[in-house]
Image (tube, rainbow, N blue to C red):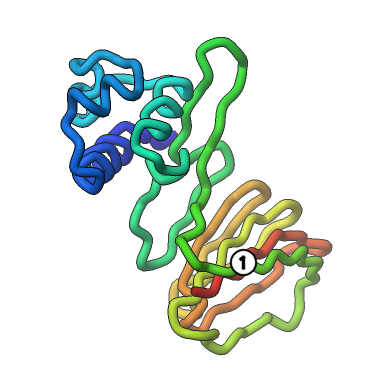
């Protein structure tokens, strides 16, 4: 399981610098100790969802921005893996798979596929990104020259502006496809 603290640490520093506010001011606005924020920015600690929400409010950013990773190539997240946070008072775990950049458009598709003829896609518009989660069966998915085998629950993100393929490896393979264009 990927621990998000290093991702969160970089995002906290980046977003605090973007606002031009001091460590003390963000701590005050979030209602947390300055030492806690300092530790989090250093990549130490295990913040709860509640602490992260407070920081997001203080920084005036959406929650997911704290866990954004720059993705310029394919990204695969296996079922149950990925940056995650847990709640203090409930049996609740949130695993971030992807965020939507400002001004982007997303189309969501349900795929129902069978083995046989592979689905080869030509490059879409520049900057296009595709996100796919296999929900049943197995498939080979991604850029034509580096497709990855996925099982139920696995996630992949890859550039849609490059040639890519979807190949069902089992009968009745199902997936959710999210096509994102800027």
How packed is label 1: few (under 14 Cα within 10 Å), some, or many (20 or more)? Answer: some
Compared across the picture, whether 7 is left or right of 74 comes to left
The image shows residue 165 at horizontal and vertical percentages of: 59, 77
The image shows residue 131 at horizontal and vertical percentages of: 57, 62
Where residue 110 sits, quadrant-wise, is bottom right
In this rendered view, identify the residue nearer to me: 88 or 17.
Answer: 17
Q: Compared with residue 58, is residue 105 higher up or lower down, i.e. above or below?
A: below
- Residue drawn at 77 percent across, 61 percent down: 173
- Residue drawn at 67 percent across, 56 percent down: 134
Where residue 73 sits, quadrant-wise, is bottom left
The image shows residue 109 at horizontal and vertical percentages of: 73, 66
Q: Compared with residue 145, is residue 154 higher up or lower down, i.e. above or below?
A: above
Q: Secondary structure at mark 1?
A: strand
Residue projecting furthest to the top: 89
In this rendered view, identify the residue nearer to me: 122 or 51.
Answer: 51
| Residue at the spot of label 1 | 106
The image shows residue 177 at horizontal and vertical percentages of: 66, 64
């Amino acid at each position: 399981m990927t621990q998000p603290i290093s991702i969160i640490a970089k995002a906290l520093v980046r977003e605090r610098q973007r606002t031009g506010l001091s460590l003390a001011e963000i701590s005050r606005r979030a209602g947390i100790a300055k030492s806690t924020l300092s530790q989090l920015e250093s990549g130490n600690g295990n913040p709860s969802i509640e602490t992260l929400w407070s920081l997001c409010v203080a920084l005036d950013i959406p929650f997911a921005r704290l866990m954004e990773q720059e993705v310029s190539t394919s990204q695969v997240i296996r079922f149950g893996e990925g940056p995650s946070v847990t709640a203090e008072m409930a049996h609740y775990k949130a695993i971030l798979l992807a965020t939507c950049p400002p001004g982007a458009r997303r189309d969501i598709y349900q795929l129902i596929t069978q083995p046989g003829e592979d689905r080869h896609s030509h490059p879409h518009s520049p900057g296009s990104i595709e996100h796919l989660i296999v929900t049943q069966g197995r498939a080979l998915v991604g850029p034509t020259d580096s497709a990855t085998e996925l099982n139920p629950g696995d996630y992949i993100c890859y550039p849609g502006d490059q040639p890519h393929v979807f190949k069902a490896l089992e009968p009745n393979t199902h997936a959710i496809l999210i096509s994102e264009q800027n």
